[in-house]
Amino acid sequence: MKKLREKMSLPIRKMVHTILGILVVFIVIQILSVTGVLSSSLENLMPELCFYAIIAVGLNLCVGFLGELSIGHAAFMSIGAFTSAAFTNAAADAIPSVGLRFFIGLILGTVMAGLFGFLIGIPVLRLKGDYLAIVTLAFGEIIKGILNVLFIGKDKDGIHIALINSNQESLDPETGKMIVDGAKGIIGTPHATTFTNGVILLILTLVVVTFLVNSRTGRAIQAIRDNRIAAESVGINVTKYKLIGFSISAAIAGVAGVMYAHYVSSLTASKFDFNMSILILVFVVLGGLGSFRGSIIAAVILTLLPEVLRGLSSYRMLIYAVLLIAMMLFNWAPGAIDFRSRLKERFKRRKEERP
Amino acid sequence: MSLLTVKSLGISFGGLRAVDDLSFSIEKNELYGLIGPNGAGKTTVFNMLTGVYKPTQGTFLLNGRNLTGMSTTAISHAGIARTFQNIRLFHEMSVLDNVKVGLHESISYSTLTGILRLPAFFAKEKAMNEKAMELLSVFGLEKDAETLANNLPYGAQRKLEIARAMATNPVLLLLDEPAAGMNPNETEELMKTIRFVRDHFDMTILLIEHDMRLVSGICERITVLNFGQELLSGNTKEVLQNDQVVKAYLGE
Ligand SMILES: Nc1ncnc2c1ncn2[C@@H]1O[C@H](COP(=O)(O)OP(=O)(O)OP(=O)(O)O)[C@@H](O)[C@H]1O
Ligand SMILES: [Mg+2]
């Protein structure tokens, strides 16, 4: 056991600690909810914490490690959400098991979001300079616009897809069923997302990104962030590794989208707007660029906060703002960084003094 | 056949002719110097030889293969490695990881192998770590392996850049002012290291340097550049004693 600990590198050790922390929180929450201490509204919030933490971790890969700003990450989430929800609804008759449909939907949503990330990345990531931010912003608006007028229906003749609401009439009145209904989105998706599968997916995401970052590919990605010309000069194919990093980040946003789609009662495109993209970016920046653990903590705190502060509704935004500033200072102010490293040193020394 | 052949290489930036009609060739295992006053166009030559700039005139060949106009990445694969005058390290990464990035092409495994931690991952990482530590010890940096590149002292950063360049397993190493910012002792030590790299790795080295003690100490032949044009080439001692060269340096 001790040997194993010594063999693990620092980032892997950090990941293991984070996973243990997540599991402890998970068990405590389970106990609180079984004993009825936890309010039902808080209990309902638990899956939400998971998918926001997941997308924050995914975006941190893009912003913190790849060094590319994406301000349209909610769009990749919406692609994962709509793909999977359309599937779980359309396949309701063919596959009765909700769990199996959710699982297949998860794979489809993740792959589709990753694919879109790849397709957008091809033209944009070849350019030198910060073009990704503006393109992802536009992409977010375009996807939202398209999903708002997307109609998919299903009847005995098969699937009907239209970008205007014309196929409602063309659907067979007996067997017809709307799956995606324009601005009304998708309703009736089974609530397959739970706190348990959320925690599993969060841990899985954390493991994937940590292993990625601490591998040959991850080093190439970080090298490009630190110095593009130097990375090229040692033979790294910059476009290739940017595409890999961005696609994986988009795919992870897709995972969060799949969870979201199987959590809400009605899935609408309007939810995945600029505000949501910025909110996710706030998680990443506040949690610290390059710190997956920080992203998770920031996502959890900032998602819980509005709920916890519900009683103080008139001061809610004020407290929220003060907390944001406090977290910002804690993470980024030179004084605070100094203080934290001194604290760490002291801990280390105390440990070493112990026989 | 020479290892590197440069044939009337030139480039213009707008109206400025930064390098004009430059020709020279370097033999295998040679230590060759490129000198000249500030703004003479030395770094620009390196930038052309590594594909950072595309020459507007002339060609260059490595072992007879024309590399003119190829991308920086492709030229690195072809076997030219370099350091930078204004240090370009991966500053947020550890010293060890900087060298491991240099090993990117020579020791390779797929992204999926890395994410899934397949057996090949552990074997290749072990090989990378060993190779990287071996290179670091050549430059006396093995104790700093876990240090952030950014936190290294200036002289050590320059050495790390050479270690990273050597990790790409090049046939030609370009060093842009490797002794800049070093004190005489450090420079002395660096000269030994450069000689060691040449002998131990059977390397061919082209270096730019302002420190004439270093140039006359280790370069067998040099080319003097002035206002983008070749002033003189040949045996180091003879060239440095030439009146024209002295004049160019004193800036008459
Ligand atoms: N990208 C560029 N655009 C425009 N002019 C450039 C560019 N790169 C270099 N130059 C110009 O080319 C000339 C040669 O520059 P270079 O950096 O090659 O000089 P150098 O010999 O390396 O000088 P130093 O000893 O100061 O490093 C200078 O006049 C410089 O301003
Ligand atoms: Mg220069």
Image: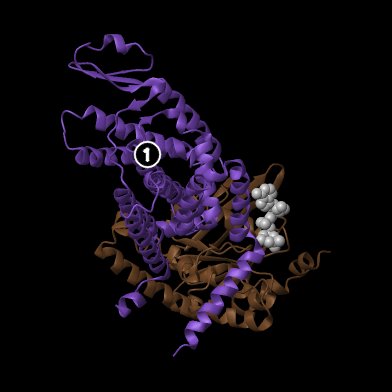
B182 vs A262, left or right, is: right
Q: Who's the residue at 62% across and 56% down the image? A: A326
Q: Position of residue B129 (x, y in %)?
A: 38, 72
Which residue corresponds to the image point at 34% horizontal and 11% vertical from the top-left?
A166
Relative to A241, does residue B216 appear above or below in the rendering? below
Residue B50 can be seen in this image: no
Q: Which residue is more in the foreground, A257 or A69?
A: A257
The N terminus of chain B, quarter of image: bottom left
B100 w.r.t. A262: above or below: below
| Residue closest to the eye, B247 or A327 | A327
Number of callouts: 1
Please state the horizontal and vertical placement of residue A26, each as a whole percent of the image.
35, 57
Q: Please, what secondary structure does the residue beneath circle 1 have? A: helix
Q: Residues within 10 Å of mark 1 (few under 14, many from 20)?
A: many
Name the kind of residue labelled 1 in the image: Tyr
Which chain has been coloured purple in this picture?
A
* Left or right position of B227 against A203: right
Residue B44: x and y in percent read: 63, 55
Which quadrant of the figure has residue B123? bottom left
Q: Is residue A185 visible to the viewer in this orientation of the structure? A: yes
Give the residue at the far top of this rendering. Answer: A169
According to the image, label 1 marks what residue? A260
Q: Residue at x 23, y 16 (%)?
A: A176
Q: Quadrant of the C terminus of chain B?
A: bottom right
Q: Nearer the viewer, residue A69 or B78?
A: A69
Q: Colour of chain B?
A: brown
Q: Write down which quadrant ligand 2 falls in.
A: bottom right
Residue B121, position in %: x, y? 30, 64
Q: Chain of mark 1?
A: A
Question: At 60% across and 60% down in the image, what residue appears?
Answer: A330
Q: Relative to B85, is A244 above or below?
A: above
Residue B67 vs residue B137, the one in the foreground: B137
